[in-house]
Image: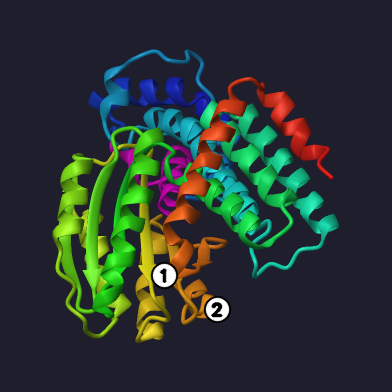
Amino acid sequence: QEAIARRAVDTAEVMLWKLKGGRIRMDDWRRDGPLREMVDAVRDAEAAQDWQAMQKAIEGWHEDKPGTSHDAFQVEDSPTRNLRIAAQRVNELRLMELRQEVNETLNGIKDPASQLSQAEVRAELQRAAHIIREMLKLGWELTPAKSARLLAMLGKAQSDGGREASIARLSNAALQMMEGSPRFVFLWDQSVAELGAEFKPAIATIARGLHEHSRGALWACIAYGPAEVVQEPTRDLEHFLSSVEAHPCSAGSAALAKAFRAAKDLFKLDQKEEHPADEQRVIIHITRGSPEGSKEAHKAFRVLQELGVMVVSIGVGKDAKVESLMKSASAGLVFKVETSSLVSFFQDAFKDVTRVLKASKSKGPDEILQLLENSS
């Protein structure tokens, strides 16, 4: 009781363990009391992915002998074991939340739908810098690749609009896509067969640009209208591109919802297999216009969004409706491109990626953040 009153979790648990063979049964603490309450609160916080609730669950608890081992700590519902896990998870969950917040901020700047004033853009840049400084305090590393994304975002914020802004926005998105161990699924609207000649070179340009700066990427492709798997996930880029090039287009109904569900299957998100902790799941959707069954497509997109999948939509030609595509794409990741400049648009975006990656290697984290804070 004295150890529990001091909230010394390891001492209290070891003492209960030693009393296991006496009149007090070890299982008694598992049914009620402060130790049990703490374990239950930690598990509830983990289920909710709530770092604040987890922090509150372990508030005041500590170890008299941090890091020591004992048989009592080996069981799954050990209070000491749960305290140690929770102390680490608070930072991990907080970083996840901050990362999502900064990504939304970066994608929102110069997004055509946001219509921010220059003063609002400056405020968002400063907000992004503040969030990143908080992430650095939690042990997050501002690598050259991540620094490059911030430089690309500066270019996006300072661009004059039009094609220049779209290229800066796409280069920023590409750097985000290439973080960690990416898995790419291309969704290709084949409902107008003759557009295959235009879309295939664009897919090849995007894939080669991403491949140049990413590591361990997986490549897959689905053509829809009707939905067909063109290539299962592969690490062989040339094999992927050959499959895309060889695919005969089958004009039909452009039902995007079916393609989204097929992409979810290719990511194997429902299967109990290990995924890398830094896995980045990206869908790159290329279409001639607005998808049929937009409500169903939006519903399928929401499922992907909840599973952490980034969806980039590229509308090609005059029939592409940005407003419609925005309902089934991640925030700030819809692009409209003219058919005649489709390939050159992506070539210019990846030239910008190469430029900011090179520039990022000569600037430290504080210098990058000061550029955000002092941008005009």
Does the magenta run of residues contain 187?
A: no
Q: Amino acid at mark 1?
A: Arg
Image quadrant in which the C terminus is located: top right
**Rendered residue at 52%/24% (across/down):** 8
C-alpha gap between disc 2 and disc 1: 16 Å
**Residue 60 image offset from top left, x and y in percent:** 60, 32
Which residue was labeled with disc 2? 323
Tell me if mark 2 has few (under 14), some (14-19) or many (20+) residues whose alpha carbon lies within 10 angstroms of its own.
few
Task: Identify the amino acid type marked 2.
Answer: Glu
Image position of 221 (left or right of 369) = left
Q: Are marks 2 and 1 in contact (CB under 8 Å)?
A: no
Give the structural element (helix, strand or loop) at label 1: helix
- Report if residue 244 is visible in the image: yes
> In the rendered view, would you say 299 is above or below 71?
below
Q: In the rendering, at what x and y percent does residue 90 appear?
A: 52, 37
Can I make out residue 143 in this image? no
Seen as rendered, the residue at the extreme front is 340
In magenta, the rendered stretch is 27-48
Q: Report which residue position mark 1 lands on.
A: 302
